[in-house]
Image: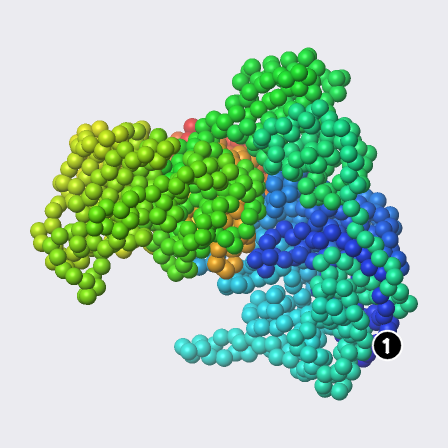
Amino acid sequence: MKSILFAISFGLAVRVGTAADWPMWRYDAARSNASPAALPDELHLAWTLEVPQARPAWPASQEKLQFDSVHQPIVVGDLLILGSSANDSVTAYRTDSGTEAWRFYTEGPVRFAPVAARGRIYVGSDDGFLYCLQATNGKLLWKVQGGPSDSRIIGNDRLISMWPVRGGPVLIDDTVYFTAGIWPFMGIFVHAVDAETGSTTWINSETGSRWVTHPHGAPSFGSIVPQGYLAAVGDRLLVPGGRSLPGIFDCKTGVMERFDFGGKGSGGWSITASKDFYVVDDAAFAMKDGASLGSLPVDAMIGDVVLGKMSAFDFTDALRRSKAPDRKGNDTEKVELKPNASWAVSSPDLPIFVVAGNRAFTGREGTVAAFDIEAARQSQKPLPPQWSSSIEGIPRSMIAGDDKLFVVTDSTIQCFSENGTSSLRHTLAQSDRISTKPRELVEAISTRDSAQQGYALILGIGSQDIVEQLASRTTLHVIAVDDDADRVDALRRSPSLLDDYGTRIAVIQRGLSDVTLPAYFANVVAGEVPAAVDKSQIENLVRTAFHSLRPYGGFACWELTQQQHDVVAAIVATGELASADLSREGAFTFLTRVGSLPGSGSWTHQYADATNSVVSQDSIVKAPLGLLWFGGPPNDKVLPRHGHGPSPQVAGGRLVIEGADMLRCVDVYTGRVLWEKDLPGLGTYYDTTKHFAGAGEIGSNYVTLPDAVYVVYRDAIVHLDATTGDTVREITLEAEAGFPKPTWGYLAVEEDFLIATSSPVSVSDEKELAKSDRIAELLAAAQYSSTSRQLVVMNRHTGKVLWTRTAEYSFRHNAIAAAGDRVFCIDSMSDLQLQTLQRRGLKSPKKPQLFALDATSGEVVWSTNDDVFGTFLNYSREHDVLLQAGSAYRDRAKDEVAAGMIAYRASDGDILWKDLSQKYGGPCLLWRDKIITNGGGGFELDLLTGKTTGWNYKRMYGCNTAVGSEHLLTFRSGAAGFCDLEGDSGTGNIGGFRSSCTANLIVADGVLNAPDYTRTCVCAYQNQCSLALIHMPEVEQWTFSNLENAPDQFAVNLGAPGDHRGPDGVLWYDLPSVGGSSPDLPVKISGTTIRSVGHHSSRINSVGDALDWVAASGVTGVESIEQQLPKDTNRLYTVRLTFAELENQAVGERVFDVLIQGQTVLKGFDVAVASGGSFRGIVKQFSGIRGDSAIEIKFRNIRREATLSGLQIIPE
């Protein structure tokens, strides 16, 4: 029976499908979680269906992103439809029996509930597609690709699209809305498609590159990252941001009306909406303007009646706005949401899982119950349940449909119906492994060490036993690619793979030319190659395989004819496949990627290497940067971000990162954990949530090399095998007479020298301490300190001590550097420390001394005690220059030096230059023949002369310091940031996440490594995970500059999100200037209805020499644009105008004239005709234009408003 309350409330909402269906997550587009269709009064268990447990994308610690932690089925007619994140499928079960009706496989995890309407099922997948299926049989009707291409990456440990569908689809007014992509720098795509045909209504692709204020008030490139279920009410589409607040879009146009990150702990993956307000993770906001309305727990909504924690609140017309004076007497608007009435339904500690008719269904472990909402309202007191039943397990979600209640637990779906019996149970099918003699190809592969774990790529499955045997005989994650639909379908449904499909085995139906696989991810590549395959096919196979082979020993193995092998040999002989090794073993050809990527570098120490250069020698990584993989292990065990633990280190294809009680080794190319070494108490010193100098003061406690990891642990240096993490040896020192057993402090490795300090010492000013004139008696032993009493050099392979040196004062850890056969160090105390010692009795302190020591013997090569003040030493191998300086900056040691530099010729100690008054932030970076300073930005000096070059860079908020590589500076600038040294295009962002307070954007092994080092951070940054990036020329790269004045030669990119360096070196500035600081341009644009239009550049297909990223944005309504010319010029210029039809106007719908200097140069110009359609850039060039003080371009509208994307004026 339907109550008056429900009859009124449900009349206010838009409904899809029949009332008896449950057509989408939480029933409708508003995500009300309430169906008007009542269930029978009495329900009985009808059947139980065992299902594979969900495999959520994100760890449980990411509570804002648990959109797929629970199965979320829907009901349409007599079918229950369930998507699976475990086996990549969508399965229909008959509601009367629980038996399977049909199954459809996508090519990635299905993380969101499908949507049903008019006999169709819509489902999004991590493979980047929205699928439309026939509800009765699961037949594919159409599919829409969410991103710009079919590129694949490793994401959350699976091979998925570069642009996974992580905005769960919603349907309203015959339109399906969904999103693709979760990394703004790669592009975010919000789609509206026609539910019948799949044709595009609109695509918003411009939000990812927007310049938006991030947490801490820091503007950066990057906006909404859709993660969660979309909701829609009226003309508004609400896109959840997961860890941030949602974005609000116009359903009709796709324009994003509003987005704000929100404060700490904001956001959520679930939205419930009404016409006046919406609720995200129990926080309510006004629909009109996003005004905060306070806390409002919501389990379900019936029109304007909110149910949460078993209470009901009537919010009909309850949103009130009023004016009130603030403390300064200014009128401000006050927005309040107060219920008109409320009543308790039952005990407040129970969640409402679903509302059906008058009843709210709830439950806890072992039980489910129903309470009458209307009866409780009338009685104004909680009532006992109208119905209850026992269940198996803990209820995680419930839905109501087809007159049945479906209770979902972690591993079952239990159906309750009016006439149900509990005897029917469908157990989870197990793999039926068939023991067969191993294929010779599988034997040849599985005997190699590098094939025991990681990823295997099978290019051409042939008979499916290659995949099955590799899965059963190794721990490889097997990914197969084949273009034959029948073979692919048979393998997906193979009984022998039931346990592993999706989790360890996945199949992509594509030809080699139709799929873009990630680089470097595969330990093994194999497949069946028929003898009839011709030369061109073999060449394509080899290039595809080698692209994906992991450096450091990834190999491909094929059974080839001698003629086919010779084709492979010819390719290798050309040198096209760098570091390739080819061998033939019987009938098998092995192609191995040997060693590191040519041009790659490592990051083995806190400051890159033992020289403290703070610059990686990797020359592969450069902007633009694109995604290689994301996800990796959770940050639960990693050190907290404010403690400034040691920076991650990279060598030999491995990244090593420290936790409070462990060292973790991760594969650089996939994020896979290689080993984890338990070392209780290892990171205790850095394990704090307060802002703390950490490793910036005392240095790192470990060093990573391709063959070994050395870590200071308790009183030993522990030597670990880099491949396995096993302990090789422990190195300790015996106590000297009168001293306790020494512990270790600083640690470095240079060639075969293991360089360390022992006996860390500290300086204290506590009154009860004794006074003395002897330095040794004034220094206290310490476990952790910035300085140590003794320098110790050992053979790194044996641990044998080669020599030691005891300091007069102490050796500051950051002022020790080594290169080749030299060790440089400073024996001193900082001014602050010396002042403390003098207060405790030290008289006539000796002058500090800088030493260059022979690494083999410890003998002094040269030394000086003149102007020795530094707290940091760097050495340049390329120029043999030693720099004495400081490293003062935010969260560095309190006694750091903030001024003064001296450069020495390192071979003999001669001073090249000194400037004791130069102020800067540190530590300094030695980049080529330059010094780059640190801080909130920095400047550049010539390494050999000390003169400033005039170059500088700027960044936004961030408490870490910049580190460098051959082509980049990396740092935090609001979001993760970089400065493009190669193209000198300015400062940009890798939007979508924040880097750590510890420098963790490490360029090494051909990859920009970004391991998650942000544990304890609850700021509303969109993603919190590890990722890796590589150079991708096609990726958009927007920057801002620190220039005050525009250069003589520049170009104007109208409507662009930021600045961009062109391939010819010309810098294109955004106009209007919206993407960070830009110089004042001598350009004036006018028009009465000027409006910016923008898209992601991947949507543009330009003709001629037009640049896609210029054509991707523009302004409409422009009437004139004028550029001032340099003074005292009267010469000829070439004017280049870039046009594109960006609003999809058909031929003949936008026509205008263009005049330059009053002369018509384009008459009746139709962009769509000239370029060949919409979203196609075209350049129109005009030479011989006379210019004196300015050049003016005017536009005369004929039909609709003129549009312009780019302007470049070039002197002839």
Q: Quadrant of the C terminus?
A: top left
Look at mark 1 in the image and give the residue it sits on.
1
Where is residue 984? Give x, y as percent. 40, 37
Which residue occupies the foreground of this view, 279 or 1013? 1013
Q: Is disc 1 placed on a helix, strand or loop?
A: loop
Which residue occupies the foreground of this view, 809 or 1207? 809
Name the image quarter holding residue 308: bottom right
Q: Quadrant of the N terminus?
A: bottom right
Relative side of 956 to 884, left or right = right
Where is residue 829? Give x, y as percent. 20, 49
Where is residue 44? Give x, y as percent. 86, 68
Relative side of 816 to 1098, left or right = left
Where is residue 556? Give x, y as percent. 62, 25
Furthest residue toward right: 419
Examine the rendering and report whether any part of residue 889 can be seen.
no
Examine the rendering and report whether any part of residue 539 can be seen.
yes
Furthest residue toward left: 844
Which residue occupies the foreground of this view, 1066 or 986? 986
Q: Name the amino acid, label 1.
A: Met
Q: Is residue 807 above or below residue 684?
A: above
Which residue is pictured at 42% across the width and 60% down the height?
689
Which residue is pictured at 50% across the width and 42% down the height?
665
Relative side of 752 to 194, left or right = left
Q: Is residue 799 above or below residue 392?
A: above
Relative side of 456 to 412, left or right = left
Name the image quarter holding residue 980: top left
Which residue occupies the foreground of this view, 554 or 246? 554
Q: Residues within 10 Å of mark 1 (few under 14, many from 20)?
A: few
